[in-house]
Amino acid sequence: MIIETIEDSPASPQTGQAYLCLHGHFYQPPRENPFTGIVPVEPDATPYANFNEKITEECYRPNADAGNFAFISYDLGPTLAAWLEGAHPEVYRKIIAADSEHRQRYGVGNALAQAYNHTILPLANSRDKNTQILWGLQDFRHRYGYDARGMWLAETAVDLESLDLLAQHGVIYTVLAPWQAATPVDPTEPYIVRLFGGRSITVFFYNAPLSGGVSFDWNTTSNADLFATSYLPGQLVTSKREAGEAQLLIIATDGELYGHHKPWRDKFMSHLIQAGAPAYGFEVCTLERYLRMYPATKEVELRVPSAWSCGHGVARWDSGCECTEGDSSWKGELRRAFKKLAGRGDQLFEQYAGEVLIDPWAARNAYLELRNGWVMPESFWAQYGKENRLVEQPGVAERTRLLLEAQYYHQYSFTSCGFFFENLDRIEPRNDIAFARRAISLTWQALGIDLQRDFLADLARIECWRTGLTGFDLYRQLPVVQEGLLPPLAQE
Ligand SMILES: [Zn+2]
C-alpha cells in the first residue's frame, strides 16, 4: 500500500520550511469515434493499439503502481478518466484512491477537478463556460466522492469571468503561469485575485524555470538527487529563508511527461518525492494542504486572457499566432465554423427542448446525471420537465435526450487540442470535426433538420497550408456511418 511509504509530516507548519509541490495535469485528447465509443487503432502507437493504451503503460500505470499520485497534486481530465475507468479499472482505482489516502492523512484532497472538455474557457461564451465548469465539478464529485476545491483550467487559459464562475461554484484555488500575473510575482507563495461581487480566488503560480526544465530539458531530470541539490535550492527566496518564512516551489507540467514523453521519468518522480527532496530539506506538499497552513495574504491582478503555452493572449487557439509554424489562419476559420454550427444547435435546442423543459440550459448543466445514469430518467425529467409534457407525448423525451446529447458533442467540438498545433490536417482537428458531425447527426435524428450543409460550406473554405486538404476533405474522410444517421450529402 502506498500509505505505508509516506513519511509522517509534522502536524503544524515549520518555520522557514521549504516545500515542494509537483502538479501533474493528466489528460489526453478524446480519441473515441463518437458514433461507436471505440478508440480506433493508431499505427504510430505500435505495439499498443492506440495512444491511450501506450500512455497508460508508459505513464499512468507505473506512476499509479509506484504510489506517486499520493504525493503529488494532480488532475485527471474527465474524458480521460472515463476511458481509463473502462479500459484499465485497476489503474483508475489507484489514481482515485490516492486522493482519499491524502484526505485521510491530511484532511484535504490532492486532486483537482478539470473543466470538462479541455475547452479554452476565455474563448467560450458565458453559458458554455458555466457548463464546462459545472460538468467538471460534477464529474469530480462522482469520481472522488466530495466537492472539488481546486480546478485546473485547460492550458491554464483564464479570464476573470471564468475565475468568477469557479468561485461561485465553490472552487477556492487554481494554478497559473507566473507571466499570467499583470505585475511581477513571487511564485513561492499563493496570491488572492479579487473577482466580482466581493468574491475572490487563490492563485498559485508555478515556478517557471523548474517547470520548463522538467518539461523541455532532458538533463534536468536525469538524476533526482542532483535535481534536489542543484536545481531546487537556487529557486528559493533567500530573504524568506533568513526571515524564517515558509515558501513553496511548484513544478506544474503535463503529467504524461513522467514516463511517456520522457521515459523513466516516473522513476525520477518517485525518487524525488519519496527520497531526494526530503533528504535535502524539502517537504513534499500539495496545494490545498499548503493553503491551510499558509493562506494567501497578497493580492495580484492578472493579464487576461492569457494561458501557459501562448504569449499572445489565447490567440494560439483562436485567430492563430506565431507560436505555431506556417499559416495559422485556419484556426480562426475552423473556430468560426464550430461556433456557427453550435449557435444554430443552441437555437434549436432552446426552441424544441424549451417546449418541454422548464429551463433547457439548467437541464444541460445537469445532463451528466442523466447521461451517466447517476439518476433515474424519471426523476431527471420530473425535475427539469414542464408538468407532464414529457410523459404525455410519446417520443418527446427521446427527442429531448437526443438534443441534450447534441449539446454534449457541440461541447466536445471545442476541445482545445484541435487548435493547438500548426496543421489543420492532423488527428486533433479531425477529431473535433468528428465530434461536430456527431452533433449534426443527433440534431438530424431528433428534428430532421440539416445542419450539415452550411457546416460543410464553411469547412470547404478552410485549407491546410501543409497538405492542401480542406476541412470538407477531412469531414468526407471520417468513418462511414449507418445510412440515415446523417443528412444526405449534396451531390456535386
Ligand atoms: Zn501565441
Image: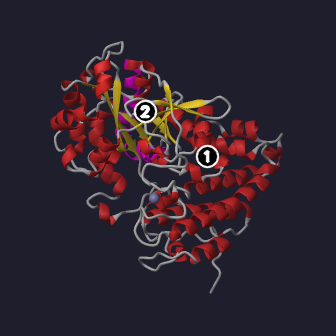
Asked whether residue 94 is drawn in magenta, I would say yes
Spot occupied by residue 10 in the image (x, y as percentages of width and height):
31, 14
Judged from the image, the quadrant occupied by ligand 1 is: bottom left
Q: What is the quadrant of residue 294 in the picture?
A: top left
Q: Residue at x 63, y 49 (%)?
A: 128
Residue drawn at (65%, 76%), measured in percent from left and top?
488
SS assignment at label 2:
strand
Front residue of 284 and 274: 284
Q: Amino acid at mark 2?
A: Ala
- Per the image, the residue denoted by label 1 is 129
Q: Quadrant of the C terminus?
A: bottom right
Of residues 35 and 72, the one drawn nearer to the viewer in this rendering: 72
Residue 372 forms part of the magenta stretch: no
Residue 287 lies left or right of residue 300; in this view the side is left
State the residue lying farthest toward the bottom. Answer: 492
**Crowd class of label 2 (few under 14; some 14 to 19; many from 20; radius 10 Å):** many
Dot 1 and dot 2 residues touching (CB under 8 Å): no
Name the residue nearer the viewer: 250 or 391: 250
The secondary structure that dominates the magenta segment is helix
**On screen, residue 402 above or below 230:** below
Residue type marked 1: Lys
Which mark is first along the chain, 2 or 1? 2
- Could you give the CA–CA distance between mark 1 and mark 2, rounded to whole angstroms? 21 Å
- Do we see residue 487 in this rendering? no
Q: Which residue is pictured at 37% across the width and 31% down the height?
A: 188
Disc 1 crowd rating (10 Å Cα; few below 14, some 14-19, many 20+) is many
Residue 364 locus on image (x, y percent): 67, 45
Q: Quadrant of residue 63?
A: top left
Asked whether mark 1 and ligand 1 are closer than 8 Å, the reply comes as no
Could you tell whether 118 is left or right of 350 in the image? left
Q: Which residue is mark 2?
A: 111
- The span picked out in magenta is 78-105
